[in-house]
Image (spheres, rainbow, N blue to C red):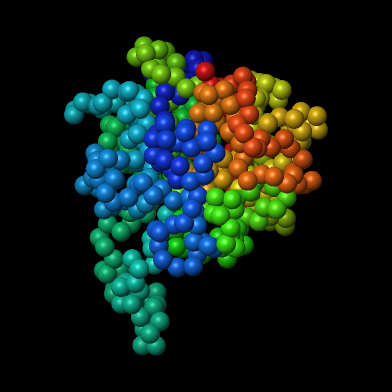
Amino acid sequence: MNESTNQRISITGMGIVSACGNDIDTVEKALLNGESGIGPIDLFPGATPPGHIGGQCHEFNDSTMKKEYLRPQRKSIKVMCRDIQLGVASANLALEQSGMEAPKADEDRTWLGVEFGADLMLSPPDVLFDAAAASRNAEGFPTDTEWGGKGLPKLEPLWLLKYLPNMPACHISIYARACGPSNSLTLEDANGNLTLGESLRIIRRGQAEAMIAGTTGARLHVIKSINLTGLNEVADPKGADPKTVLKPFDKNRQGEVLGEGACAFILELESRAQNRNANVYGYVRGIGSSCVRTVKEGPNPRQAVVNALRAALRSAGIQPEDVGHINAHGCGSIKIDAAEAAAYREVFGDDLGSKIPVTSLKPFFGNCGSGSGTLEIAGSILGLKNGVIFPTLNYSTPDPNCPINIVHGEPLKTDNKIFVNVNVTRAGQASALVVECV
């Protein structure tokens, strides 16, 4: 198992937890029918995000977690924050959907590894209230000097384990008895492509025969919502239908709509998938990544996307004209959407760059941060399964600063099975993944 291979790497399972549903059939139906999962949220009280809307996983709650999605880990739910819960649930669903054999009680499956991505995880403010109150000085303000002796003992004993971004991979590895390579990534929106790309490399190096690869993200969090709203990154619905607020690449876009979600995939050596007669959705062909920023000028998302795209095409051994569509980051940001569009024109040229179909699926799910990339990959796979590219919802007015071919209105028919998924962070980290569907 330590010999490198030139075999194709098959995608044999998917698990989705999202605002559009928590099973493949439900999500596929929503995407085909153009039904956005964005709407009112009830995760926490308050005035943020604007209009109190987002892509909430309403069907993923305390009851369904214990009875269905996290039944194998129900005793551990109390030491999982929502990001972890979403991620572990998506991996459970992917394992079940893949038809992969369940582990024996005493089996150490060194042929199976885990690569999972997550955002930095934050506790709600009320969790720290008692500790902060206990560490106050005579003037009533919390102090560092009193924290260790008086504040820290007020925290729940396993507080840290609820908010570590490596914990999704830990819980997944334990349940699946995945004793092969295990790694956790914290590169925000770029995570999705990178977890599948690193899994591709691990299998090709002969370090594993199969990988559980995925990401999770919960931007519908009181602190994250306040932070992003304060940075003027979040769109204000101003009374509009929540489903119509997020408008990637549209001239009238005004920012993001936050969401939560997770998606996991099972990747396997082609020979292993064939030997067990697994259902194959497609193949991971290539990966590229780049971070571009300087102290003086800050992040450069356009150049980062250019670099990542070119690297992904080289890795996959294909030319720009081989790509059937781009599943774009398309977060609704005035600056980032324009930078992304400029990158596509640079990589694909003015002619092809103005024709190649581009879509963004964030208007279905909201921006889930780390969780978005894998959800979008799953969306393109489900679209090509039906011979279509799903449209960008709410796109109606072209922006001269985004001179690219946005798929909108009805799903676009296609017989080209190759797509590139692109994601980029506001810090200038980009990633691109090439997938070929069956």
The residue sitting at 32% across, 29% down in the picture is 96
Residue 236 position in % (x across, y down) = 59, 61
Q: How many numbered marks appear?
A: 0
- Where residue 126 appears, as percent x and y from the top left, is 35, 68
Provide residue 20's location: percent of width, then percent of height.
45, 42
Name the residue nearer the viewer: 117 or 35.
Answer: 35
The answer to whether 232 is drawn above or below residue 37 in the figure is: below
Q: Is residue 331 left or right of residue 162?
A: right
**Of residues 237 and 273, the one drawn nearer to the viewer in this rendering:** 237
Picture quadrant where residue 422 is located: top right
Residue 406 seen anywhere in this rendered image of the structure: yes
Residue at far left of view: 105
At x 68%, y 31%, the residue is: 357
Quadrant hosting residue 304: top right
* Nearer-the-camera pick, 356 or 95: 356
Q: Which quadrant is home to the N terminus?
A: top left
| Residue drawn at 39 percent across, 78 percent down | 142
Residue 434, relative to residue 280: is it above or below?
below
Q: Is residue 425 left or right of residue 204?
A: right
Residue 217 visible in image: no
Q: Residue at x 69, y 37 (%)?
A: 406
- Residue 3: image quadrant is top left
Q: Is residue 427 left or right of residue 203?
A: right
19 w.r.t. 420: above or below: below
